[in-house]
Image: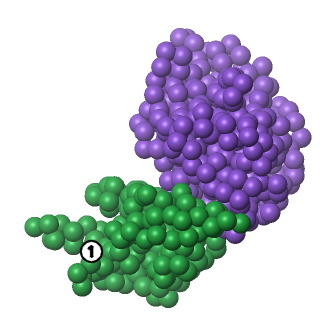
Amino acid sequence: MSKKQIKLIVNGKEEIIEVNPYESLLKVLREYLGLTGAKRGCDYGGCGVCTVVVNGKAVYSCMYPAIKAEGKEITTVEGLYKNGKLHPVQKAFIDANTVQCGYSIPGAIMSAYALLLNNPNPSDEDIKEAFSGNLCRCSAGYYWPEAIKLAIKYMKQRES
Amino acid sequence: MHYELKDYIKPKTLEEALKLLHDYKGAAKIIAGGTVIHELSERNLLEGVEYFVDIENLGLNYVRIEKDGLHIGATTTFNQIVNNSLFTKPSYYALYLAAKGVSSYQVRNVATIGGSVCSSISFLDVPNALVALNAKAKLVSLNGERIENVENLFLGMLNPNISEDEILTEIILPLEETKTASYYMKLTERAFDYAIVSVGIKVKLNENGYVENIRTVFGNVQPTPYIENKVYEIAKGKYINEDLIKKIMEEIPSVEPIDSINASAWYKKKVLKVLFRDALKETLEMIS
């Protein structure tokens, strides 16, 4: 099996790495680039803890080939924290008490981030849909929709 | 995801992709969104595959109305269908519901309409809805192209009627029709599960409200989408009322369902009747 050299743009930074032809973006992020925010959960595209944003869309990085991501903008939860400041979505997730065990949070935050990127004023139905691919077992997920509403408020405050 | 490939190739043109498929014969497999491929690799069902040919960059991502129908490029994702207001029109509503019913938003962002057909999996919703809508598919190879009714593309589970050197490039739906509506309904154990059984319906009434055409498809009842002709036979030229619906329910399904991991044939048979009734009522409501 020959390795391939690819160029990825992760959180705005160019990374040149060698990957196996069919290797998941999740593995590359975690094991080659040390970005462990995205978690390995079910590995079957169902639990959502591996969610990252590729070209503005939330995807399951466990089933997204790294080579497919070449040349696209990849954002992980690590990329939201900038200049010593939390992203409004991150702050909202903390303030809305969405964290109990915390395992699903990086994925849920990325789904929330992608939602607000594409739709700054989502309806309740849109919010439900955006989280349809993220599971939470410890029940704090109940507060995710509230976090979205709080994030919208923080984003508006940031703009004004 | 740890399948050992010799190479993952991203051709830039359709010709280049077709040539790769031709040269590598069965050793090359097409990958689009990669969701079904991922499942196949996890289940060791990719024996003999040495190359993936990624068709994402071939310009097959579009939805456009032409004279002969609504053309949907093969790599159009489920979410692109859900977010396109064309598909909320009654004539295409079954496809909208089928695509929206795929539970994970993240899967819908990458899974493609072409991939769902080429997988030939009986419980996937989008192919069943396409058959209900009388969709055709265009398949291209170095030897030329063919247009097939989508229902003719399934030979059995994971066994599409598509040769190794062909690419499904687009799906073609009939143009929007008047007095027509369609609907898709599935029964699942939990919201994010695959369908136990599903029903896709398209109804066209004439100006007086009598049945001009009904196309009914049952998903996961047979290893391939099952077109239930009984419904049209009974309802043809008639006005649909409660009595007629009851009569149809007695007669369907006209085939013995297959047992599957989530339900027995006996259960599927019972529940299909009810699912059909509900889906038909929803469809009619959209016409009136």
Say which residue appears at 63% left-offset and 55% top-offset: B8
Q: Nearer the viewer, residue B181 or A98?
A: A98
- Percent coordinates x, y for residue B13 in the rendering: 54, 37
Name the residue beneath numbered marker 1.
A88
- Percent coordinates x, y for residue B224 in the rendering: 79, 39
For residue B149, what is the image quadrant? top right
Asked whether residue B23 is in view, the answer is yes
Say which residue appears at 50% left-offset and 22% top-offset: B176
Q: Is residue B182 left or right of residue A153?
A: right
Instruction: Check disc 1 and give the amino acid type.
Output: Pro
* Colour in which the image shows chain A: green
For residue A77, what is the image quadrant? bottom left
Residue A5, placed above or below residue B286: below
Q: Nearer the viewer, residue B236 or A38?
A: A38
Chain that bears disc 1: A
* Colour in which the image shows chain B: purple
Q: Is residue B141 left or right of residue B247?
A: left
Asked whether residue B218 is in view, the answer is no
Total numbered badges shown on the rendered structure: 1
Protein image colouring: by chain
For residue B141, what is the image quadrant? top right
Say which residue appears at 71% left-offset and 59% top-offset: B6
Say which residue appears at 32% left-offset and 61% top-offset: A116
- Percent coordinates x, y for residue B31 in the rendering: 64, 50
